[in-house]
Each structure stands twice: as C-alpha cells, then as structure tokens.
Amino acid sequence: MSPRELMARAIQLAERGLYTTMPNPRVGCVIADAEGNILGEGWHKRAGEGHAEVEALKDAGEKAAGNIAYVTLEPCSHSGKTGPCTDALIAAGVAKVVYGMEDPNPQVSGKGLQKLRDAGIEVEGPLLEESCRALNPGFIKRMTLGLPLVRCKSAMSIDGRTAMASGESKWVTGPAARADVQRLRARSCAIVTGVETVRHDNPNMNVRADEIALEMLTAEAAAEKQPLRVVVDSKLRTPAKSFILQGDAPTLLVTTEASDPERRARLQKTGAEVLVLPADKDGRVHLGELLRELARRECNEVLIESGATLSGAFMYQAHVDEIIIYVAPKILGSSARPLFELPIERMGSMLPITITDMRAVGHDWRITATTDIER
C-alpha cells in the first residue's frame, strides 16, 4: 500500500470512534513497513482508554521497531488520563512517523512532532490533511476559537413548514430520517432546545440504541454516553415533569437573573443543573455566552434541535456552522409554522448558505449546508 492508502486506512479506523471519543478527537493509526505492509492498527475508542498510537503499537508488537507509523493527528506529547503517545512511539523504536494534521491545540501544536524529531525519528506530513481535519471539526474549532461546532437540524414539509399552527409536528419525516437524527445526536456532545419545544412536544432529546439503525454493538456504544441536554429557558417555564428532566442523560437548564430563584431551586430538585447566564438586549439567554460555556465544558459538537424562534436566533446571530434539513414529501399549508423565525424584509438581507450534500434518506431528503453569514 502507498503512504496515501495507509493514511486513508488510518482515517477509516478513526471513523470507528465517531460516537464514542468525546471530548477527545477521533484518531486512527496504522503501523506499516517500508513496502506498505500493515503490521498493526488501532484507533481511539473512548476517552480515558488507549490512544490510537498505543493501540496500533500493541497490535504490531515487536514488529513496530524500525518501521513507520501513520497517524491522522499529531501524536500528543503531554499526559492526561493516559501517557504521551510520543513516548510510546519512541519506546517502540519506530523509525518514522507520518501525520495527517498538526494538533490544533495552540498549547501543544507542533511540540509532539518536535519531540519525535529530537529522538531521532523521521517526521513527514501533513498527508491527506483535509480528510483528517474532517474527522474532528468540533474539536478543531474548540481548540482554536474556544467555541463548539454548531449544527442546526430541522425537519420540514416540501413547502417549508415544520409544524401546524397549533404546534403539532409529529411526525413530519419518516423513520429513516429519525434514525439519521439519532446518529447526529450520538456524535454530539450537547443537544440544545428551547422551552417552547419542551412545552409543546415534551421530547426526551436522548440517544436510543434501538432507534439509531446501527449494528447493535455500535448502537449500544453510541448510546452509552448520552449528550448533555440543554434547555434555553430565560424565565424557567420548563414543567418539572418534562421528559427532558428524566432518565440517565444529564440536563442543563439555562436561564437569566430575571428568573424566579424559588423556581430554580424546585427544578434543581429534579436532578437538572440550573445555570444562570447573562441576558442579551432582549432579556433572553445570551447565545454567544451559552456556546462559550459549552466549550468550557469540553463540548466539541453541538446540535440545535428547536423550534423556529430559537433556531432562527442562532442563525441570525451567526452562531451556526452547518444546517441539516430533512425535507418530507408533504404539504402542510400556508398557516403552518415556518422553518426559521428571521427578521428579514429585503432581498439584500438574505442569509447565504452553501449546499454541500443532498441525498435521499428513506422517503425523505436530507440537505446539508454550511453558512456564509457574517455579522
């Protein structure tokens, strides 16, 4: 196999950790000889367990000495829950390390590579950098900007409506699309919704292994670590018996100083955490402060699953990186609710997006787009 093929294999291995490595990055590693024969493979399975390099070295055993390690992310040079991967590579006697991309953490970027060079190991890269970066968009953004990657997921009819005027919305899309949403939840560190969605739909907002449409072992692993459920609730109107306050998944109710302290205390007794953040000029939770708080809590990828008002606010304030819209072959009519509540009155105020993918998901269609909004 060529170096590009070996790095592509390391990327495939890293993808196996799509639902389980948070808050750590997804990383894969291949040990090969100079002729391109694979001697060992490994990937980071979950936080606190062996990193990809350690797993690959374990798989290769003594054959790693004098050979080449292909790793999607610069080997770490610091100790966390596990020891530095650079030390493991040096101890194993590898002759060369080919990396996909540098560590985006400015405190460590390049230091792992330099430590390998100082030990006499040849270092080469980056290789297939764009594909390696695509493994960890949220981790990269958190490390470089102190913010999580934000996806906004919505489901609509073909005429652009999300719910009836009464608020009734179950189910706009079919089971294949709903399973796809389960997978989006599983790769996210937090799911953000609004109090109106909680009051109208009473959702669980959790990952359910039996609905995710993956092989059972993968599905169970994906559901093992539930994402943080976040309710934006400026006045704390969340009912105490809401499903989102129940179950094993953690819940964070985000409010402002204007909310009732006694109400905060009662909701905390449900097991939820109540967090008071600054209000914006309209007296609502400051969404920028919320995202910075989620980054401080090591959230890499955040999924917005809310109604038109909160989703529209995230969009209008330029907090959304990616939009995922499921389009159902149904017509709900002109009195039904729109996809986003946005104060746009002129063509010149349009919010631009770039469609990056469009595909069928069961009987529905999924549109993926990136935002090009500057504010």
Image: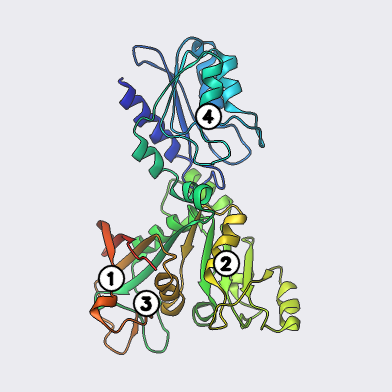
How far separated are the C-alphas under marks 4 and 1? 44 Å
> Counting residues from the N terminus, which is met first, the one under dot 1 or under dot 2?
2
- The residue identified by callout 4 is 75
Q: Nearer the viewer, mark 4 or mark 1?
A: 4
What amino acid is at disc 3?
Answer: Phe
Are circles 3 and 1 on residues that touch, CB within 8 Å? no
**Dot 2 alpha-carbon crowd within 10 angstroms: few under 14, some 14 to 19, many 20 or more:** some
Are circles 4 and 1 on residues that touch, CB within 8 Å? no
Q: Determine which quarter of the picture holds residue 153.
A: bottom left
What amino acid is at disc 2?
Answer: Glu
How far separated are the C-alphas under marks 4 and 2? 32 Å
Residue 192 percent location from the top left of the image: 52, 67
The label number, if any, that marks residue 328 in the structure image:
1
- The residue identified by callout 2 is 289
> Counting residues from the N terminus, which is met first, the one under dot 2 or under dot 3?
2
The label number, if any, that marks residue 340 in the structure image:
3
Quadrant of the snapshot with the C terminus: bottom left
How far separated are the C-alphas under marks 3 and 4? 42 Å
